Image (cartoon, helix red, strand yellow):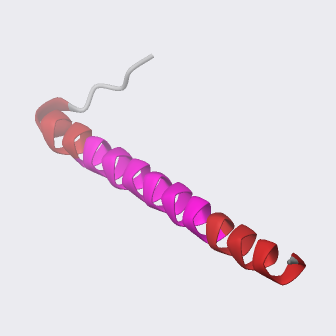
């Protein structure tokens, strides 16, 4: 199931690991920014309702 990468196995696997870490970081940053924006919008909406 796993292809034989030969002498490039460490290079390829480390590139995949780095890519997954970067994608995970982007997801975390996006979720944090989304929560912050949602809170800001909810606060602004509450102020206009008063």
* Picture residue at 41% right of the left edge, 48% below the top: 24
The dominant secondary structure in magenta is helix
Residue appearing at x 86%, y 78% in the figure = 50
Position of residue 5 measured from the top left corner of the image (x, y, whole percent)? 24, 32
* Front-most of residues 33 and 4: 33
Q: Does the magenta run of residues contain 18?
A: yes
The quadrant the N terminus occupies is top left
For residue 41, what is the image quadrant?
Answer: bottom right
Whether 27 is among the magenta residues is: yes
Q: Which region shows up in magenta?
A: 15-37
**In the drawing, does residue 38 fall left or right of residue 3?**
right
Name the one closer to the observer, 4 or 47.
47
Q: Residue furthest bottom?
A: 48
Q: Looking at this rendering, what residue extends furthest in the front direction?
A: 50
Q: Position of residue 46 (x, y in %)?
A: 79, 72
> Would residue 16 be found to the left or right of residue 44 on screen?
left
From the viewer's perspective, tell me whether residue 21 is left or right of residue 31: left
Image location of residue 47, percent across then percent down: 77, 79
Q: Closer to the camera, 14 or 8?
A: 14
Residue 33 on image: x %, y %: 52, 66
Residue ranking furthest to the left = 7
- Residue extending furthest toward the top: 1
Q: Please identify the quarter of the rendering in which residue 17 is found.
A: top left
Of 41 and 8, which appears nearest the observer?
41
Task: Locate residue 43: give its quadrant.
Answer: bottom right
| Identity of the residue drawn at 74% across and 68% down | 42
């Amino acid at each position: 199931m796993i292809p034989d990468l030969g002498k490039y196995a460490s290079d390829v696997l480390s590139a995949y690991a780095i890519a997954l870490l970067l994608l995970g970081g982007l997801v975390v940053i996006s979720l944090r920014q989304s929560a912050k924006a949602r809170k800001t919008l909810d606060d602004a909406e509450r102020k206009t309702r008063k």
